[in-house]
Image (tube, rainbow, N blue to C red):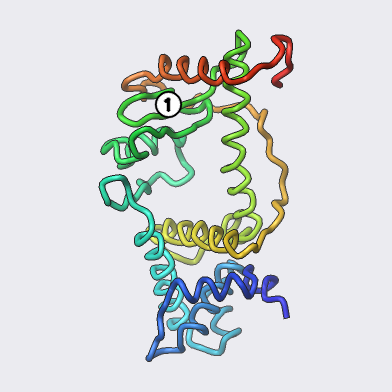
Amino acid sequence: EDPRPDFRLSRESFVVLLNLLNQDRRHGWGATIETLVFLFWLASGTSYRVVSRVFGMPRSTVHDIVHRVTEDVVAILHQAVCDHQGRFIDTYVGWPGSVHDSRVLRHSPLYRQSAFPPPGHFILADGGYPCLQHPLPLITPYKRVVQGVGAQRFNSHHSRARCIIECAFGMMKTRFRTIFLKALEVHHTFVPHVMTACTILHNICLSAGDIVVQDDELEDDAPEDEGEAGLEAVSGALWRDQLSAEVSALEEVPPDHNYC
């Protein structure tokens, strides 16, 4: 039968995950059962006690399995993703959901160590962030109301590019809705690992053709929080103007084209 209602992954995705974990447990309940316990907990967002009843094992065992498999899944990312100097970047720095993202950014290794992205690349951000060139390249759209065709074209391309990650967030929240909408029975320091595991599983599902349609439509025109003033170190405004000019030069569109 289709395992997605209970585990949120197709059989194909589950096989890919097991192969990536590449673990032949000679103790405990075995890699397959332990991975299913972890996925069931992740899909249902229920308590360890409920999971223990479903699988017929002690609550403490469920706790240990969830933590162990979560760390194993996160290890997949540690092995595959690092910065241009070969270092893995941990971006979680506290204040979950209580302050604007720009303050979290300012105190993260991404900002303080200029650890990402690789040279020649930049990060796209919404209007709640400052436009920066240093310590990390962060490109934001022009503030509304936009004047000039070039700026309108730039904002249009910028918005379409950002929609890709917004769609990814939407699909991931649809697949693991209970994780994102319910309080988890874990210590707050473990929550970032759970979120990271969700993103890894999301990418595994995509690679296996296991796609979910997000429930909510994107609201691209929603008002943007201006974030935290004073974050800007070296402005990226001139760099953004240069990018805007290059984008505009590549496109032949009537001056009266509506970019809204």
- Percent across and percent down for residue 79 are 35, 62
Q: Which SS class for mark 1?
A: loop
- Percent across and percent down for residue 119 are 33, 35
Q: Nearer the viewer, residue 102 or 182?
A: 102
User: Quarter of the image holding residue 44?
Assistant: bottom right
| Quarter occupied by the N terminus | bottom right
Q: Say how many tags the image has.
A: 1
Q: Nearer the viewer, residue 6 or 190?
A: 6
Q: Nearer the viewer, residue 191 or 233?
A: 233
| Quarter occupied by the C terminus | top right
- Percent across and percent down for residue 100 are 46, 34
Residue visible at 63% across and 75% down in the picture: 11
User: Quarter of the image holding residue 254?
Assistant: top right
User: Quarter of the image holding residue 146?
Assistant: top right
109, above or below 223, in the image? below
Residue visible at 54% across and 18% down in the picture: 142
- Percent across and percent down for residue 179 are 57, 60
Q: Nearer the viewer, residue 161 or 144?
A: 161
37, above or below 208, in the image? below
Horizontal side of residue 184 vs 176, given as left or right? left
Density class for disc 1 (Cα within 10 Å; few <14, some 14-19, many ≥20) is some
Residue at mark 1:
228
Residue visible at 48% across and 81% down in the picture: 34
Give the amino acid type for the residue marked by disc 1 in the picture: Glu
